[in-house]
Every structure is written in C-alpha cells, then in structure tokens.
Amino acid sequence: MAKIMTFAEAPPLVWTEGSFDGQMVDFPPLVNDYRKSYDLLRAVALPPEASLDLIEDAARTYRHEAEQEA
C-alpha cells in the first residue's frame, strides 16, 4: 500500500506499508515517481460498479468450474 500525502506548508511525501513494516518516502524524485504510477493506475482503473461486476463474474465462473470438477 502507498499513500501520497500533500501539505500546505511542506513538500509532499509518500507512506508505503507492507505486511510487517512501513516507511516514509520524502525524496522528491521518488515521490514524483509514486505520483506518476498512481496517476497511471487511476487512468486504467474501472469505475467501482464495473469493478464489482467483474469480480462477481469471476466468482460465478470460479463456482461454475468448481462444480464441474466435483
């Protein structure tokens, strides 16, 4: 997980978190890389309703295939 934080009186920073630790990133070029990656992900992400439809369809397909194997 990564959270990009911006402040009125300070430069932006990123908080990254894994299963067992977290770290703050304040090196401006690296913060900028995180922002670019986030922007790219948002650009290709489905809207919430379409995401839910996709997940539900995948669950139906999985159930159907599991029933066929049983």
Image (cartoon, helix red, strand yellow):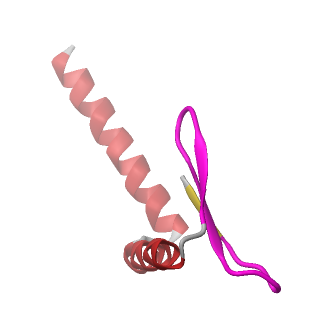
Image side of residue 36 versus residue 25, left or right: left
Image side of residue 67 versus residue 51, left or right: left
Image side of residue 5 versus residue 52, left or right: right
Q: Give the image location of residue 60, x and y in percent.
A: 35, 40
Depicted 39 relative to depicted 34: above or below: below
Asked which quadrant contains residue 63, the reply is top left
| Residue shown at the point (38%, 56%) measured from the top left | 54
12 drawn magenta:
yes
| Residue shown at the point (52%, 66%) measured from the top left | 49
| Residue shown at the point (49%, 56%) measured from the top left | 52
Task: Using the image as rendered, state which of residue 34 and residue 50 is in the foreground.
Answer: 34
The furthest residue to the front: 27
| Residue shown at the point (41%, 72%) measured from the top left | 41
Image side of residue 45 versus residue 69, left or right: right
Q: Give the image location of residue 67, x and y in percent.
A: 26, 22
Q: Give the image location of residue 35, x and y in percent.
A: 50, 77
Depicted 51 relative to depicted 34: above or below: above
The furthest residue to the right: 9
23 drawn magenta:
yes
Q: Give the image location of residue 56, x and y in percent.
A: 43, 48
| Number of disc labels | 0
The furthest residue to the bottom: 8
Task: Using the image as rendered, state which of residue 19 and residue 32 is in the foreground.
Answer: 32
Image quarter where the C terminus lies is top left
The furthest residue to the top: 70
Task: Using the image as rendered, state which of residue 39 and residue 44 is in the foreground.
Answer: 39
User: Magenta residues?
Assistant: 5-25
